[in-house]
Image: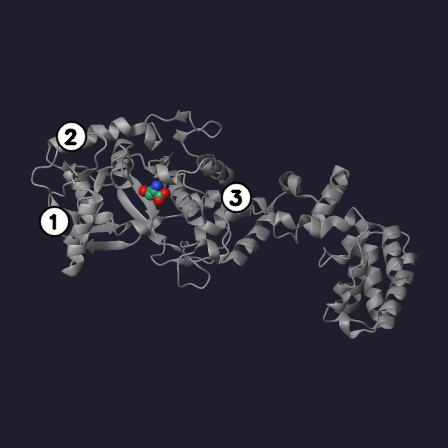
Amino acid sequence: MTIRTRFAPSPTGYIHLGNVRTALYTYLVARARQGNFILRIEDTDQARFVEGAEEMILETLNWLGLNWDEGPTLNNPKEESGNFGPYHQTDRRDIYIKWAKKMISEGLAYADPYTPEEVQVFRDKARAEKRAFLYRDHRPENPPEWQLGMPLRFKVPEIKRYSWKDAVMGELSAGPEALDDFILIKADGLPTYNFAHIIDDFEMQVTHVIRGSEYIASTPKYLSLYEALKITPPILAHVPHIMAPSGNKKLGKRDGAKSVTEYRSEGILPEAMLNFLAQLGWNDGTEQEIFSKAELIEKFSLDRVQKSGARFDEQRLIWLNGQWIRSLSLDDLYSRCQSFWGEEAKNADESYKKRVLELAQDRLKTLQDLPKLTSYFFVEPEIDTELIDGNKQLRKLTDDERRELLSIARQEFEKITDWTPETIQNCLNELLETTGQKPGILFSLVRIVTTWAPFSPQLNDTLALIGKEKTLQRIDNYLQK
Ligand code: GLU
């Protein structure tokens, strides 16, 4: 059997982390067994449609390397590839209508004759009698003949308990109260998600439905529809929510989580994002923390996805990003940094920029840190004495003591004839001895007055690249202040 999975986003806004994680798991399940990964656009909710959202979804998946085998094409979403299309639900109307008519003829669906006011009366009555309101308690005896413009409801043929196995959540069950006559086709002629996804998954020969756990509660309804249509349900896998850092609620916009697009523009690498998302709710049972996409394809399995929600931890994403940045070759990193250099570096020589980048590579946590970490290699930094006064160690020294130390350092630097990381390091080590200071004081002081940055690469490497003349000049600038 060929595995066929699908990611089925709705173009209703920005694509949040939970969606992308679902896409990743869905992709991995397909790739692990040479299956097909389908992208289907669920655009039947016209009221929530957002212009440009689909393009953003395609762009994001592409950036992450989650390439789909069937669906809209990246550069022109109106064009599609694959033998099971169309892949936009609004282009599949005829298919849903065909199924709807078949259901009517089999007595499995009826036109909903009630006005909203009438439904409200039923609801109020149910509430007064302290029972749940169910449409199936109000099936019309003689429903009107259905025509486009009227909502069409499913007539659940058998009211019973359902038990099923979820590939992540395990054995689940729900009583008959979970079943109801839900809408198949809305008054606007478009199908509901509840109906459309079942038809599409069947027609597209989807083998695994992987989606958020918010769909568990509706699963009995879907099972009753599968049964009525004599369709064997695909494997169902509901993945847990991503939780807010506090751990007690679902991650929302207010919890500091950004959209994938924002993380991208802040210089998070796609590799780090994938690594991070994969582990939000999954582990391979070992201590391994860094996983490439290829390793994830090899190791991921739904049965190791946790049942309970994983907590979102942005610091971990940033840490992983730093790890991934370090693992890149200099050329690769350089090409990804193009848009992140500061204004001051724009016209600098490429080979010089590469040398700067090589030094910064170990310290970079996001590509966005690049200007902050490197601008002093390109332009004269502005003196910011806050950096000294705010430093716990340096605060203890008087102004005279600082000047004294810097004068000695300057003197010794001046004597170096061959200005290399090694000779500078030797000189720095000797200075520790002659001054009797700790590196935390001496090196920090030299580092600050030569860079005026909150942090920098290794001091000797930094000074070597800044050059002897500029190093001395910057120390002088401070001493003359
Ligand atoms: N369009 C649905 C959503 O975005 C898809 C759910 C599913 O994967 O079936 O939540």
Picture disc at residue 102: 2
- From the viewer's side, name the closer residue of 38 and 437: 38
**What is the C-alpha distance between the residues marked 2 and 1?**
23 Å
**What is the C-alpha distance between the residues marked 3 and 2?**
43 Å
Estimate the x, y position of residue 337 in percent, counting from the top left: 65, 42
The amino acid beneath tag 2 is Lys
Q: Label 2: state its secondary structure.
A: helix
Q: Residues within 10 Å of mark 1 (few under 14, many from 20)?
A: few
Q: Quick one: label 1 or label 3, which is nearer the N terminus?
A: 1
The amino acid beneath tag 1 is Asp
Q: Report the residue marked by disc 3.
A: 261
Estimate the x, y position of residue 353 in percent, counting from the top left: 74, 42
Please name the residue shown 62% across and 40% down the image: 336
Q: Label 1: state its secondary structure.
A: helix
Please name the residue shown 45% across and 47% down the image: 16
Q: Quadrant of residue 306?
A: bottom left
Please name the residue shown 16% across and 60% down the image: 128
- From the viewer's side, name the closer residue of 46 and 312: 46
Q: Report the residue marked by disc 1.
A: 137
Q: Quick one: label 3 or label 2, which is nearer the N terminus?
A: 2
Q: Are circles 1 and 3 on residues that touch, CB within 8 Å?
A: no
Picture disc at residue 344: none
Residue 393 versus residue 211 in the image, above or below: below
Is residue 265 visible to the viewer in this orientation of the structure? yes
